[in-house]
Amino acid sequence: MAPVTPALGPPPKLPHGTLRITPLGGLRDVGRNMTVFEYDGKLLIVDCGVLFPEDHQPGVDLILPAFDSIRDRLDDIVAIVLTHGHEDHIGAVPYLLRERGNIPLVGSKLTLAFVDSKLREHRLKNAPTWEVEEGDIEELGPFECEFVAVNHSIPDALAVAIRTPAGMVLHTGDFKMDQLPLDGRITDLRAFARLGEEGVDLFLTDSTNAEVPGFTTTERSITPALEAAFAQSTQRIIVASFASHVHRVQQIIDTAVKYGRKVAFVGRSMVRNMTIAQDLGYLTVPPGVVVDLKQVGTLPPSKVVLMSTGSQGEPMAALSRMANNDHHVITLREGDTVVLASSLIPGNENAIYRVINGLVRAGANVVHKGNALVHVSGHASAGELLYCYNIVRPKNVLPVHGELRHLHANATLARTTGVPDERVLVVEDGYVVDLKDGVAQVTGRVECGYVFVDGASVGDLTESELKDRRTLGEEGFISVIVVVDSASRKIVTGPEITARGLAEAESVFEQIRPQLKDALVAALDEGITDTYRLQQTIRRTMGRWVSSRLRRKPMIIPVVLDA
């Protein structure tokens, strides 16, 4: 079934006894997850995450969900339920709390601890927190929320069943079905089955790995590859992972202990998160194993493990700085081993390969998912999703969390298990889905584009300005300065041409200078003295010449001054 494309605009007034579901992020990207539930005039938000920029978004730090559709209803929000502590699910919380600082935050102990550290960084102190764990049932306005344990690549992840008089929704969050998890906490399939018996009217399921056949490999299966890397290395070992991947860090610490190495955390977010995880008992560290980064220089290289951020090639993260030889403490040496213990988030491939090449150039041995089993996914593959559909037997399905190809693959799995075609809704961010009398259908669509964070600026950067940045970076720019006397209709000075970011020598622009003069003189002779129109004359003339002569489309900045 092809996705419906309703007209952009406010959805109809919510009918009585209807539950409205509006995803504002996470349904065309791997990240920026946020879904709004509305019933009886109240709103419940599940997750509020960020998306990390790609190469074609220069200068962007983070991408947020658009809050426009709920901005005039902030007082109606009863809570933000957070399924787990990854950035793509909690990273935008501080930005929403800037608009209303006392929205209650609901989540597990570790999730709330990670959020609390972010709020302190943003100097936000008023948000009440509501700690929950699996099995808890809480009343949040008109929403009864039951929390279910799920296994993911971070401890304390939760699915949430949302009950209203309009029906029950089961939202998996991010999950997989690892039967041998490191912390012993498995996805509670008995609870899924019990909810299925009660009747799940709408199933929101993680789609990230829906294209991957079979079952996701267990976390424990990467231990041999990690141990092999440790056994073969006689120099320092640097492991890069997500700063919130507590399970992976635990594996590295356990392996370091086995091979007699000390571990130092590198990167502000890694230090912060692992300190929290250790303090709360989610990370077990034998005494004396973790050392301060400043102590590393006093230890033999064969006794050192550096646990670093930067597994996605982020330009400012610790690993990228090492690859570029500009880290303030660590300089890579010949024979160092670097382990990239993470997946490649779609869109980050080029950045990651640039980092790998930089590491190899520095003499490091790089171990990554492409040449060793050093990472497994945190998301359910197709076999696990089929298993869940057969247990839950939902009336309606709304695939979430993934690019459009992932959503379609998940929808196909749902249909395969017997969910009627018309009850499987493949939608994108901003589509409004209403649930009533056991039937879910798309009823409208709201605006919810990207909101860019650029330094201290939030939402000021537009797509047009990003296009200008890409042009500057890829095609360069040409400035043309001319001084005219509008009274005598003559050129006083110029045109002076300056080019940046073009390989051609500036002498090549001597060829276009006479054409520019002729075009300006012709315009002045016609009585055109308005500087804007003269600038347009320069832009057209220069643009045609550069396109035909240089096969480039640089940004052209004409400046006309009236003497």
Image (cartoon, grey):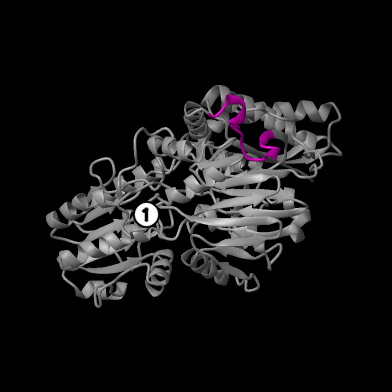
Number of numbered discs on residues: 1
Question: Which of the pair 265/482 is nearer the observer?
Answer: 265
Q: Is residue 437 magenta?
A: yes
Answer left or right for 431 relative to 398: right
Front-most of residues 507 and 550: 550
Q: Please state the horizontal and vertical placement of residue 226, each as a whole percent of the image.
A: 21, 53
Residue at x 87% of width, y 39% of height:
487
The residue segment tinted magenta is 419-441
Looking at this rendering, what residue extends furthest in the front direction?
197
The answer to whether residue 525 of the structure is visible from this angle is yes
Other residues around mark 1 within 10 Å, as few (<14) / some (14–19) / many (≥20): many
Residue at 39%, 48% in the rendered image: 378
Relative to 344, is 123 on the left or the right? right
> As displayed, is residue 266 above or below residue 371?
below
Location of residue 123 in the rendering, given as x and y in whole percent from the top left corner: 60, 72
Residue drawn at 61 percent across, 51 percent down: 162
Kind of residue indicated by mark 1: Ser
Quarter of the picture containing the N terminus is: top right
Q: Position of residue 558 (x, y in %)?
A: 68, 39
Residue linked to disc 1: 320
> Is 385 situated left or right of 456 in this image?
left
- Residue 448 horizontal side relative to residue 214, left or right: right
Q: Is residue 480 visible?
A: no
Residue 281 in magenta?
no
* Residue 484 x, y percent position in the rendering: 77, 40
Establish if 545 lies above or below 454. Answer: above
Q: Find the residue positioned furthest to the bottom.
A: 287
Dot 1 lies on which element? helix
Give the camera-side residue of 194 and 308. 194
Q: Residue at x 35, y 55 (%)?
A: 241
